[in-house]
């Protein structure tokens, strides 16, 4: 899958692409990264897209995921940045955040990228319950990444919890439609 990005003048920028053969529009694409550091041999990358739906609760669709050692995670991040054009990275620690900044190839085109650390509540029982709740409500669609979650259950759940907690604390921003200048005659032109 390859995503497109549009930034129409005066409107909210958005991502677009086909998911399950259906044209979709997304407000943001968020990547969650759990790096293989601090004694972990493997890491995981999960790319989620938030549906473009102003005024409604967050609805996330999994686009891609990869698990493996450092080189696999690094290569996947660069590939997903180029193909899926994600604009947010959420990590589980400050150390991970600083390491991600050093990865070459993450700067891509005009799409800005924000690297954040997930709130600590994401990695508690409440964070796991929030993930389960979104799945039960049909607002967290994981079909495309089931194979990674089956192999890396604990890391995958940690990455999902990071995205859900961060997305809940930082709702998507939609620009209000700008009102057009009213038509009429300019002031001070009568009698000229």
Image (cartoon, rainbow, N blue to C red):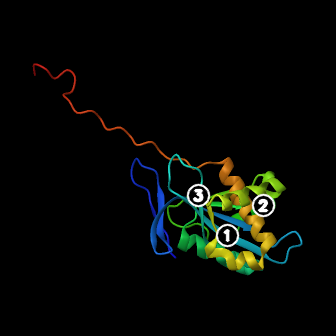
Tell me if residue 71 can be seen. yes
Between the residue at mark 1 and the residue at mark 2, the CA separation in whole angstroms equals 13 Å
Between the residue at mark 1 and the residue at mark 3, the CA separation in whole angstroms equals 15 Å
Label located before the other in sequence (1 or 2):
1
Residue 164, placed above or below residue 182: below
Label located before the other in sequence (1 or 3):
1
> Which marked residue is nearer to the observer: mark 3 or mark 2?
3
Nearest the viewer among 161 and 177 is 161
Tell me if residue 116 can be seen. no
Q: Residue at x 46, y 51 (%)?
A: 12
Tell me where residue 164 sits by quadrant. Answer: bottom right
Do the residues bearing badges 3 and 2 touch, measured as CB atoms within 8 Å? Answer: no
x and y percentages locating residue 66 in the rendered image: 69, 77
Q: Residue at x 48, y 58 (%)?
A: 14
Rendered-image quadrant of the C terminus = top left
Name the residue that disc number 2 marks: 92
Label 3: which secondary element: loop
Name the residue that disc number 1 marks: 46
Between the residue at mark 3 and the residue at mark 2, the CA separation in whole angstroms equals 21 Å
Residue 83 horizontal side relative to residue 135, left or right: left
Judge the density around disc 3: few (<14), some (14-19), many (≥20) Cα neighbours within 10 Å: many
> Which marked residue is nearer to the observer: mark 1 or mark 3?
3
Name the residue that disc number 3 marks: 59
Residue 124 horizontal side relative to residue 47, left or right: right
């Amino acid at each position: 899958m390859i995503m497109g990005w549009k930034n129409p003048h005066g409107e909210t920028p958005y991502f677009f692409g086909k998911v399950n053969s259906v044209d979709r529009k997304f407000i943001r694409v968020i990547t969650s990264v759990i790096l293989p550091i601090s004694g972990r041999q493997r890491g995981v990358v999960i790319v989620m897209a938030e549906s473009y739906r102003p005024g409604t609760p967050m609805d996330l669709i999994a686009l891609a995921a990869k698990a493996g050692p450092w080189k696999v995670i690094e290569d996947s991040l660069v590939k997903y940045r180029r193909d899926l054009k994600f604009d947010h990275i959420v990590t589980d620690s400050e150390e991970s955040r600083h390491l991600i900044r050093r990865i070459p190839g993450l700067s891509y085109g005009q799409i800005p990228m924000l690297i954040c650390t997930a709130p600590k509540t994401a990695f508690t029982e409440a964070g796991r319950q929030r993930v389960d709740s979104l799945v039960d409500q049909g607002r967290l669609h994981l079909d495309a990444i089931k194979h990674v979650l089956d192999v890396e259950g604990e890391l995958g759940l940690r990455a999902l919890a990071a995205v859900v907690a961060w997305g809940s604390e930082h709702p998507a921003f939609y620009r209000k439609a700008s009102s057009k200048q009213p038509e009429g005659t300019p002031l001070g032109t009568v009698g000229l």
